[in-house]
Amino acid sequence: MFYVGKRLLALVVLLVAISILVFLMLQLIPGSPVSALLGQSATNPAAVARLTQELGLNRPLPVQYWRWLDGVLHGNLGYSYQNQQPVSVLIGQNLPSTLALAGAGLLISLVGGILLGAVAAVRRDTPADSVTMGIAMTLVALPSFWLGLILILVFAVALPVFPVFGGSGLRGLVLPAFTLGLGVLGITARFVRSSLLEVMDSPHVVAARAKGLNRRTVFLKHIARNALLPVVTIIGLQIGSLLSGAVLVEMVFSRPGIGRLLVQSILNKDYATVQATVLIIAAFYAVTNLVVDLLYPVLDPRIGGA
């Protein structure tokens, strides 16, 4: 319980630090929310002063931050004056789409990454190893926005199988999910290969082979079970990468989601929405890593007894 409490405290401190950092960074953006809201009326000093006071932007920065934080602690993420609705409503409308995209991307990265990594490890120092790792390295190096455009040109324009932009349902999810998941797939493949090779050279595997067990039994019972367990630790990191990568993917595919909402809010200087969106992404990342850390000793009793 002490360990759990310590990790929860660290999580809270991390989220507060991120919220402060984002708040301060927003102050560096040229222009102001008042000018963005007033438009042509921004040349009217009286209107500017009135709206500045209404938004509380005339108060010291620590006071502005505390007002926002106090609202978050009471379940109020603020109000989006650009969209004329509460920020919580905006996030509630866009979050499910992003979670579906991140979940599909995670599935693609895990399935493909484990298969590529396993092939590379089993065929170590062979052409199959070189080809699979070459594919993995290439996927890691490809920018997601460029990969998305290529997939659109091939599978939506040349071969009109999937919708080009803003598609809904499963067909509309395929291209964005592959765009998001393929880059992370390469990282997973490299990690799986390294983990498998480490276990394959361990003494207990050598002993199992010396007993005359067939290769399939040795791989499934003595190698895979131990080597794939560490993959759990990268799931938290992957979710963070997928959520942050969703920003570009949602823009490329004109897909609704908190990533696209974040970009639009930054352009519109919608500070309340930016702060809340970044906080939500950071919370998902931190909570996922916390859950993985807590589950790992359960999955591997050796750690719990260490």
Image (cartoon, grey):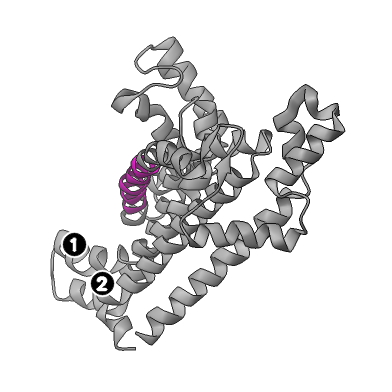
User: Where does the image place residue 67, in percent across and percent down from the top left?
Assistant: 62, 59
User: Where does the image place residue 216, in percent across and percent down from the top left?
Assistant: 16, 59
Q: Assess whether mark 2 and mark 1 are in contact (beta carbons under 8 angstroms).
A: no
Inspect this view and state whether residue 289 appears: yes
Q: Which mark is residue 266?
A: none
Q: Amino acid at mark 1?
A: Leu
Between 253 and 228, which is closer to the camera in this rendering?
Answer: 253
Q: Secondary structure at mark 1?
A: helix
Q: Secondary structure at mark 2?
A: helix
Label 2 packing within 10 angstroms: few (<14), some (14-19), many (20+): some
User: Where does the image place residue 128, in percent across and percent down from the top left?
Assistant: 37, 45
Is residue 148 found left or right of 304 in the rendered image? right
Which quadrant, please, contains the C terminus? bottom left
Between 124 and 175, which is closer to the camera in this rendering?
Answer: 175
Q: What residue does disc 2 label?
A: 299
User: Where does the image place residue 304, in percent across and percent down from the top left?
Assistant: 30, 84
Per the picture, the main secondary structure of the magenta-coloured stretch is helix
Q: Residue at x 30, y 46 (%)?
A: 111
Look at the image and give the residue range highlighted in magenta: 102-119
Q: Residue at x 58, y 61 (%)?
A: 69
Q: What residue does disc 1 label?
A: 220
Q: Is residue 96 above or below residue 59?
A: above
Q: Amino acid at mark 2?
A: Leu
Place residue 2 in its image quadrant.
Answer: bottom left
Q: Residue at x 32, y 51 (%)?
A: 114
- How many numbered badges does the structure rendering display? 2
